[in-house]
Amino acid sequence: MKQLGVHVKPILPLWPLLAVMPAQAQTRLNMTEGVTDISQQVYGLHMTILAICAVIGLVVFGIMFWAMIHHRKSKGARAAQFHESTRVEILWTLIPFVILIAMAVPATKTLVAMEDASESDLTVQITGSQWKWHYKYFNEGVEFYSLLATMPEQIQGQINKGENYLLEVDQPLVLPTDRKVRFLITSDDVIHSWWMPAFAVKKDAVPGFINEAWTRINEPGLYRGQCAELCGKDHGFMPIVVDARAPEEFDGWLAQLKTEQAEAKAAEQDLLGMEMSMEELMTLGEQVYQKACAACHQPGGTGLPGVFPALKSSELVLNDRAAHIDIVLYGKAGTAMQSFDKQLTLKELAAVITYERNAWGNNTGDLVQPKDIDQARQGQ
Ligand SMILES: [Cu+2]
């Protein structure tokens, strides 16, 4: 990620404390200033309130230690008696009250601004599911999944970890800079949370609810975030990457993606008349399986006892072809088995089902062709 040199002035004048930590914004100890007006306001608030807390701490402890040293019993000091002093009572109520209000005013202003997603230029629906993100551009007819792209060998410690370990995806969310983008955030299964520190956006993705957030990115660049709600076994494996581009560049990208997706749909139709060979299906099927299924059903199809069913020697896989196609296409309600109908292409669906029916000693010899998937869809 690009290092940002923007400096945000705290709302209050620079406290002496801030002077001794000038490089703080560049270290990992502090939160990022981010690349949106909101994230910079959040950063400014954070620094201001930190400074207020530090000054209160210094003053309170200063007075306390000064009193302990200069008014100790061994010096012959006697405690003053001012029980039920109205003046003291008023002072120690009023001073904290004034400090709290002074902090609440700017904080509330920022919070209100963060919630105001009105008059946006673009709306993106973000759907979390175990364990990936789905992005859909409203009124554009464009949507795609975004999956972890870190190699399994890095995760298993067989090779060195890359620079963006667990923070890289196959297809980033592309957004325009200088436009107000509204996010509608929801989930397909459990609670996830879409968290992009550089934008100061962190919203829970709750099944059955739609949460709103927005951003206006000031600088093009690649920004990285993560799911921030413990959402199951692979919670740490569903990163978020935003590729922010200048508006014209974004428009070009969107137009190109639209054409590509339309072409891919047309190509699917051609597939219907085609017979793929066992070898072709098995090769593609294995790739798809490792990418889409192995996280739960395990690379060897053994599943995890009591959690994810085994596919190896599975009754359903071996004996019920129609049910097998159906469960891959539409998932199983109430379980972690999700619908792959829209996540995979026709060819990939045919290949992965063929693979599951013929790998790991499941020798059904059965070929599932793209047209079989299409027929199953029609029958629904
Ligand atoms: Cu999650």
Image (cartoon, rainbow, N blue to C red):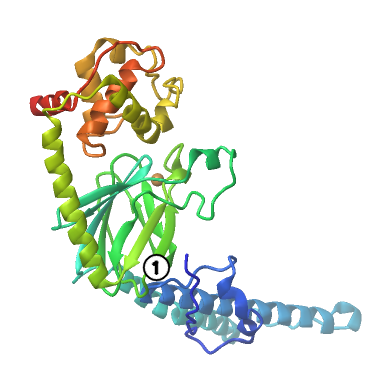
Residue 60 in picture, x, y percent from top left:
67, 79
| Quadrant of res 331 | top left
| Quadrant of res 191 | top left
Q: What residue is at 41 percent from the left and 30 percent from the top? A: 294
Q: What residue is at 22 percent from the left and 25 percent from the top? A: 276
Task: State left or right for residue 212 relative to residue 262.
Answer: right
- In this picture, is 121 found above or below 68? above
Task: State left or right for residue 197 relative to residue 207.
Answer: right
Residue 289 in picture, x, y percent from top left:
36, 30
Which quarter of the figure is the C terminus placed in? Answer: top left
In this figure, which residue is indicated by the disc labeled 1?
Answer: 221
Task: State left or right for residue 285 relative to residue 71.
Answer: left
- In this picture, is 262 found above or below 45? above
Residue labelled 1 has its Cβ within 8 Å of some atom of ligand 1: no
Residue 165 in picture, x, y percent from top left:
51, 50
Q: What residue is at 56 percent from the left and 79 percent from the top? A: 52
- Residue type at mark 1? Gly
* Mark 1 secondary-structure assignment: strand
Q: Looking at the image, in which quadrant does ligand 1 appear?
A: top left
Question: Which residue in the rendered view is the most extreme toward the right?
Answer: 74
